Image (spheres, coloured by chain):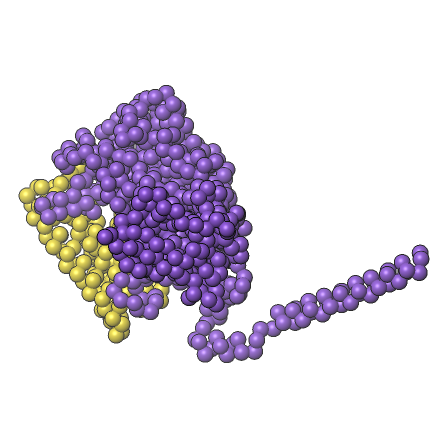
Amino acid sequence: MLKLFSKPAIVLALAIFSGTPSLSALFTGEALGLQAPGGALVATADEGKESALSWQKQARDTRATVIGVVKELNQLGDQGNPVVKNLIDDAGMWLKMADAEFAKGDKLMEKKDFRVASTAYNMAWQYLVKAATAGLNAKSILTGK
Amino acid sequence: MSRWNRYWMSTLVVVLAVAFAFYLHTTNAVSLKRASLPQGAEEIATARGLSPDDVEAALKTYVPSGKRDEYIMFASGGHSGQVLVIGVPSMRLLKVIAVFTPEPWQGYGYGSVESKKVLAEGNPPNGDKLTWGDTHHPALSETNGEYDGQYLFINDKANARIAVIDLRDFETKQIVKTPNMVSDHGGTFVTPNTEYIIEGSQYATPIPYEKYAPLDKYKEVYRGLITFHKFDRKKGRIDESQSFQIELPPYWQDLCDAGKKVSEGWVFCNSFNTEMATGGLGEGKPPFEAGASQRDMDYLHVINLKKAEAVVRAGKTRTVNGMRIIPLKTAISEGILYFVPESKSPHGVDVAPKGDLLVISGKLDTHVTVFNFDKMMNAIKNSDFEGKDPYGVPIINYKSALEAQVEIGLGPLHTQFDNEGNAYTSVFIESTIAKWKLGGAYNSGKDVWTLTQKLPIQYNVGHVSCTEGDTVSPGGKYCVSLNKWAIDRFNPVGPLHPQNFQLIDISGPKMKILYDMPIGIGEPHYVQMIRADKLHPWSVYPKVGFDPGTMLEDPNAAMPGGERIERKGNTVEVWMTAIRSHFNPEHISVKEGDKVMIHLTNIERANDATHGFAIDGYNVSLSVEPGESTTAEFVADKPGVYPFYCTEFCSALHLEMAGYLFVEPKK
């Protein structure tokens, strides 16, 4: 299964936020664990659980990245810039919504409702991507990069 | 040689010598002028806080007074329903072409018979009168895969419509309401000789959409469609009698591109909801954004257009609302439709200049995928399939079709090309433009299929467009990043922010941002940039009494000396001319309830001598360009006295260019 935003992607994101100039070393298919599956569309019960676990991991990994971003932005502060403040507030809102979906997903996993748990973790990840986008924009405004 | 001949020869030599000396002097003077910038330039830069890069950007974008731009950019006007015309590199807005939305300055939809006809033709059969459109993707007409500067096509996503704009006068000539579809996104795109204008539906519905079916019938009844509108270049109009559609699975088809050169005759479209998610947030079901992104792969649709044409000719279609549709089962059995897995929720499919490579961007992926057309064709020929989708469409083996994958960043969307074998991909979440090197027939060496630069843009780019960058011969020089969010880039103008077009210099080894252009009219989505010298618009209409609607002489045109008013029953017909600074006639008398037709001709020939015509209180607004003849029609249903006047400042006595409409009340 294609793994997106996995560990190397976290390194990438942290590199972005730490201003590491050279990112090309990170961009190898091998480093990102990318494969090229095809695949049927019909999910079996095992694939349902596998999908849920995969989304759970992906969302958790992305959350760790976003928390790192939030910490950095807290250190930078909004520097009195209301646009940045709004973006930081938004990022916080998305993070809360993501955590709510996480909690929902975890409960569904306990009930073995893997299909719905998968979509809950997916939604958590979607919200985290939005938080990351807001954070990236805030950093871009503050640092010009 | 005679004495007279020697005299004239000597005089000629002296004249030539003087002329040459004068030439040298002025050239020298100009050279001297060019050799040094004004002394205050550095002071100005310092006072304005401009960096050397800022000054360089200013020099590269400034087009001096009276000079012309090198490229013309046609941008969708988004929700405005119009098309924007912008000069590059100056980024000056040259015009807003009225398309789907009535526009009074251009006399579009405010009483003129011609424009009302165009707008009315675009209304759906249920009688709705649409007054806006959601324009997304303009497409210039092409000849042999190059922009030819003759026509521009644009879609309306909100209603599934296509408009045709004639670039001789930059006016909309036709709007087609596409049967059976009510939303589109994969439009407009053209085949290499503009045989067809492609329009793909986006959100699946029953066929036709007017047929109700509940969502629990989604898999059985809901479908996608792709329409191939036949373009009659001689007439400059879409000929729907020769158009056709292909039924597709309900996978939410997205963007398309026509093959070119080696892949000519094939068409490619993304899809992003092969999960067949049906939403239901609010009913306790997962929302579309989660449901439609569950799987790692969606399907690139690979369509054999040549075979489709043959199937249509053979009559193997069904007709719905007057449109021939190739059924999905027929598309499969006749070898018209194939799938290739593509990275999830893809947004762009972009065919490289030689037609040999297809670049796919999965918007929730970190890399772009490049398919090889020849490999794809071999896979089809050898039945190298991974299986079939639930509807029976063969799925080409992914690895067999794959050429390369390039790591780009977070959220790649669209790709365009330059003339040096480079590709430029927009990266939404990261807010960058990624430049990378094509391999294969474009470049050799170790650094092919690698990222060479990422340029931060502000912010969250959708499409990137480069000069002629989706043709068989891209121009290089510039790209434009079409950013969705401007956030803090411009003076604040309230909570609704403009979009941000950023002009990028790609002429050197490193991309550089040159300019931010706010777009405060709608969300543009996509643009195409054409060399300005490929466009040959008229400056005035070719003859006095010319009808832009038919692009022929108007048999009803008012000509000088032929001005008159005629009554036939309850219809009053007026033949009126306009010239600086009067209308003739200046008085129109009618009775309440009369139908009034005014044939108005601008009998001038000078560039820019446009006259407007508005009737106070009657919601009539016309624009008549030099030579143009137009007809306004309305019912004089309000008694009283209504001045009419020229609305386009034309002369010193422009205010005196007026008249009166007298509407006598019913007794």
In the picture, the quarter occupied by the N terminus of chain B is: bottom right
The residue that appears at 26% across and 40% down in the rendered structure is B124
Colour applied to chain A: yellow
Percent x, y of residue B644: 36, 59
Percent x, y of residue B490: 34, 67
Is residue B288 placed above or below B459 in the rendered structure?
A: above
Q: Quadrant of residue B458?
A: bottom left
Is residue B173 placed above or below B16 in the rendered structure?
A: above
Relative to B15, B106 lies left or right: left
- The front one of B400 and B337 is B337
Q: Is residue A102 visible?
A: yes
Relative to A85, B449 lies left or right: right
Colour applied to chain B: purple
The residue that appears at 24% across and 41% down in the rendered structure is B127
Relative to B534, B76 lies left or right: left
Percent x, y of residue B428: 32, 53
The residue that appears at 93% across and 60% down in the rendered structure is B3
- The front one of A79 and B24 is B24
The residue that appears at 37% across and 20% down in the rendered structure is B314
Relative to A51, A137 lies left or right: right
How many marks on residues? 0
- The front one of B665 and B334 is B665
Q: Is residue B274 visible?
A: no
Percent x, y of residue B378: 41, 28
